Image (cartoon, helix red, strand yellow):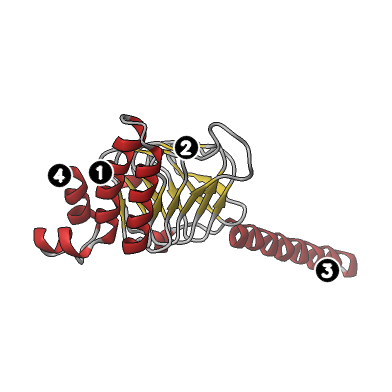
């Protein structure tokens, strides 16, 4: 619980006091409710009571966390409205989710059907991580991305479907809020094509000059 409140202080500059953290952050309330619901689900196997606690939490916070989901320490849901976390989701330590994130399944399959997230991960607003996939440690997923394949550790993912940009040696958890610095692989590819066209045009003009000479 202490790590969860500390995560709010560390990752949200708008948080000014302990009292503000425990009264004004629905993400924190949703986590507290989930801990109780998960206890009923996992330890006591009172599944209906666990689901009722989860649904009450959803009504008051706008965040839906299935009581079967496993969530580590230092978990932070910023703003949080519209966040959905599926039953077989596994989340490591020091993970941050922004509003509208879905950690969901892709069909009606049984068993493990939701993602597994490692440690020190940031998932941007509106991103969807779907299916029984694994997201490695030190990963950032850009806002609005749709991830349906495994992601290696120390990576940045953007786009639909999610494209991986490896940034070796960079500790991504030191830049929790640096969403404005996400790469755009499509724009980079277009820029490469434009540069290639300019090079070919230059080469063609030089060839024509040699012929005229």
Q: Count numbered badges in the picture.
A: 4
Closer to viewer: mark 2 or mark 1: 2
In space, the residues marked 2 and 1 are separated at their CA atoms by: 19 Å
On-image quarter of the N terminus: top left
Sequence-first disc among 1 and 3: 1
| Position above or below: 23 against 163 | below
**Label 2 secondary element:** loop
Q: Residues within 10 Å of mark 1 (few under 14, many from 20)?
A: many
In space, the residues marked 3 and 2 are separated at their CA atoms by: 67 Å
In depth, the one of 209 and 87 nearer the eye is 87
Q: Residues within 10 Å of mark 3 (few under 14, many from 20)?
A: few
The image's mark for residue 209 is 3
Question: Marks 3 and 4: CB-CB under 8 Å?
Answer: no
| Position above or below: 66 against 196 | above
In space, the residues marked 4 and 1 are separated at their CA atoms by: 8 Å
Query: Residue 58's x, y, as percent?
Result: 37, 58
Sequence-first disc among 3 and 4: 4
In space, the residues marked 2 and 4 are separated at their CA atoms by: 25 Å
The residue indicated by pointer 1 is 74
Closer to viewer: mark 2 or mark 4: 2
Query: Residue 210's x, y, as percent?
Result: 84, 64
Closer to viewer: mark 1 or mark 3: 1
Q: Judge left or right: residue 69 versus residue 72.
A: right
- Say which residue appears at 35% left-offset and 46% top-offset: 172
**Label 3 secondary element:** helix
User: Would residue 165 be visible to someone looking at this image?
Assistant: yes
The image's mark for residue 2 is 4
**Label 1 secondary element:** loop
């Amino acid at each position: 619980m202490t790590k969860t409140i500390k995560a709010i202080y560390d990752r949200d500059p708008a948080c000014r006091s302990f009292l503000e953290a425990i009264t004004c952050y629905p993400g924190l309330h949703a986590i507290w409710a989930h801990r109780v619901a998960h206890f009923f689900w996992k330890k006591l196997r009172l599944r209906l009571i666990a689901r009722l606690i989860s649904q009450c939490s959803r009504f008051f916070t706008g965040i839906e966390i299935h009581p079967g989901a496993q969530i580590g320490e230092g978990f932070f849901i910023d703003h949080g409205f519209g966040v959905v976390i599926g039953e077989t989701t596994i989340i490591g330590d020091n993970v941050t989710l922004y509003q509208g994130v879905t950690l969901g399944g892709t069909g009606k399959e049984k068993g493990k059907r939701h993602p597994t997230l490692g440690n020190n991960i940031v998932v941007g607003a509106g991103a969807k991580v779907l299916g029984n996939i694994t997201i490695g440690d030190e990963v950032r997923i850009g806002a609005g991305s749709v991830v349906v394949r495994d992601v290696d550790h120390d990576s940045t993912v953007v786009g639909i479907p999610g494209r991986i940009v490896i940034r070796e040696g960079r500790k991504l958890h030191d830049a929790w809020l640096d969403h404005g610095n996400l790469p755009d692989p499509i724009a980079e590819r277009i820029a490469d094509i434009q540069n290639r066209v300019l090079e070919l045009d230059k080469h063609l003009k030089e060839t024509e000059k040699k012929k005229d000479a």
